[in-house]
Image (cartoon, rainbow, N blue to C red):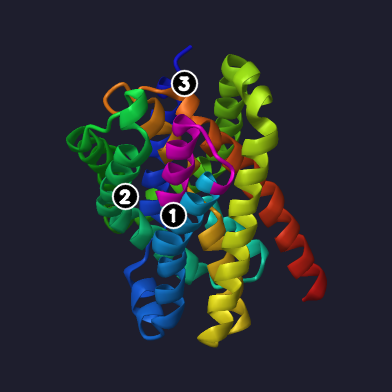
Amino acid sequence: MNTIWIVLPILTLLMFDLGLSLRFEDFGKVFRHPWPIVVALFGQLVLLPAIALGLAYLFRLPPVFFIGLVLIACCPGGSSSNVFSKLAKGDVALSVTLTAISSVITLFTIPFIMSWATQLVGDSVGISLPVGNLIKQNLVLMLLPVLLGIGLHYAWPRAAEKTDKVLSKLVFPLLLVLITVFYIQHHRTILDNIGVLGACVTALILLAIGCSSLLSRLVRNDAQQRRTVIIEVGMQNAAQAIAIASSPLIFANEVMAIPAILYSLMMNIVLLTYVGLVRRRL
């Protein structure tokens, strides 16, 4: 089974569900206090890819994993961050807004960063990036579903609310199915590389959490905002990374998606632990 036919519908549902949950008034509330947004976007769009690049060199990852690690670091925040922020008693409006903004901005930053990363290590092993195809796929799978979700929310709010409740319950089980199928198909490659790659991915998540926490304290975000920024920077849209890596229109390389699969597993373990510690202190 080609996992691309599983991940594409999941990614589309994720972005459509994000559009259903957006409220324009949330943007107004948050933009009156811009520092949490600035810190989170800097952490997610600049700091995380830079850390991934440094770790890929430090752990001497082979080109396919090097590109895969930078790819997951370039992706926007995952929609699950909104649920995690709620569990951590964070600023949910901030979380939704950050996920939406990062999803739009990364439509432009992913092609730029990934083109550079692919040229850096991919040319020598025959890995290339068709930038035009990447932009087209992101517009269709990322931007269009969000716009449709927003349109449904404002045209038929009750239908949007009911749809959101159904989709929010379906997405996580579907992601587990994706991870299971992916593991069955690539278990030997995953097991052969899980030591070094697993350590590298875990280090990326922990450094993302640590740096975003430090930045939030430096700009004096309140506790709610700080918890949300930590979760938003640490939680990436793994479905998008898998879609880009495995898409026949772009990299057509499922092995490249292994860092995203491991990141998805570890980010949930690490951030659930973080949420648990937070709730014990509150």
Dots 2 and 1: beta carbons under 8 Å? yes
Q: Position of residue 263 (x, y in %)?
A: 58, 43
C-alpha distance separating marks 3 and 1: 25 Å
**Residue that label 1 marks:** 49
User: Hey, which residue is sitting farthest right in the picture?
Assistant: 280
Residue drawn 29% across and 28% down? 250
Residue 184 falls in image quadrant? top right
- 191 or 147, which is in the foreground? 191
Disc 3 crowd, CA 10 A, few/some/many (<14, 14-19, 20+): some
| Left or right position of 248 against 183 | left
Identity, as a three-letter code, of the amino acid under mark 2: Ile
Identity, as a three-letter code, of the amino acid under mark 3: Thr
Image disc number at residue 113: 2
Residue 275 falls in image quadrant? bottom right
The answer to whether residue 221 shows anywhere in this view is no
Query: Which residues are drawn in magenta?
Result: 58-75
* Residue 254 included in the magenta stretch of the image: no
**Residue that label 3 marks:** 3
Q: Position of residue 186 (x, y in %)?
A: 58, 18
Mainly helix, strand or loop, the magenta region? Answer: helix
Residue drawn 26% across and 49% down? 112
Dots 3 and 1: beta carbons under 8 Å? no
Q: Position of residue 196 (x, y in %)?
A: 66, 37
Q: SS for tag 2?
A: helix
* Foreground label between 3 and 2: 2
Question: Mark 3 or mark 1, which has the lower sequence index?
Answer: 3
| Left or right position of 59 against 256 | right
Question: Mark 2 or mark 1, which has the lower sequence index?
Answer: 1
Dots 3 and 2: beta carbons under 8 Å? no
Residue drawn 58% across and 66% down? 230
